[in-house]
Amino acid sequence: MPVTVGSPVPSASLVALGEAGPQTVNTSDLKGETTVLLFFPLVNTGVCEKELCTIRDTLQQYKNLKARVIAISVDSPFAQKLWAEKEGFQYEFWSDFNKEAIQAFDCAHEELVGLKGVAKRSAFVVGPDGTIRYAWVSDDPKVLPSFDEIQAVLKNES
């Protein structure tokens, strides 16, 4: 079932690679602050790089709006970390290697370029109370989310 504005954030376990190594995180714990979740198909791909570099280059705007940014893909946390370091991404990456989040958020491609269970390019804003404030999912992996729409929602939150 699609995730809609006003619904509670779905619960899904993922892996974040922190200073102490891999740790389990859960989307249901996203309370107390406004969070932007960006699901993207795969690391080291052109459109994904464009999307996440746009966030990198405008990250201060998100910080000014008191928003936490988390990028999510089905890649391993180790592949995500290498890519983030290479590109200079200064925000969080969560690995949905077990594909629990893309199922919970209903944003999984059945098949994309021969790969099954890759994330659809999607954007969600989770409010401090754990409800969805913005939901966007694209069936076309070449289409980027509207960063202006996301920031407009964040401005209403702050």
Image: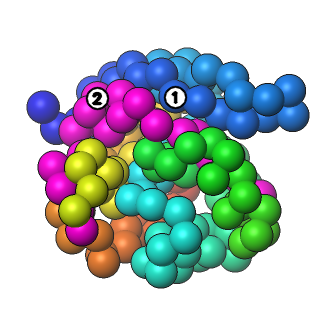
Identified at 41% across, 23% down, the residue is: 12
Comparing marks 1 and 2, which lies closer to the viewer?
1
Give me the disc on residue 14. 1
Identified at 47% across, 80% down, the residue is: 46
Say above or below: 138 vs 47: above
The residue that mark 2 highlights is 104
The local secondary structure at tag 2 comes to helix
Coloring basis for residues? rainbow
Q: Residues within 10 Å of mark 1 (few under 14, many from 20)?
A: many
Identified at 16% across, 49% down, the residue is: 110
Residue 108 sits inside the magenta stretch: yes
Q: Which residues are magenta?
A: 90-113
Residue 105 spot, x, y in % from top left: 29, 36
Residue 114 spot, x, y in % from top left: 22, 62
Identified at 18% across, 56% down, the residue is: 111
Give the residue type at disc 2: Ala
Say which quadrant the N terminus sits in. Answer: top left
Give the side of residue 104 with respect to residue 67, left or right.
left
Residue 102 spot, x, y in % from top left: 32, 39
The local secondary structure at tag 1 comes to strand
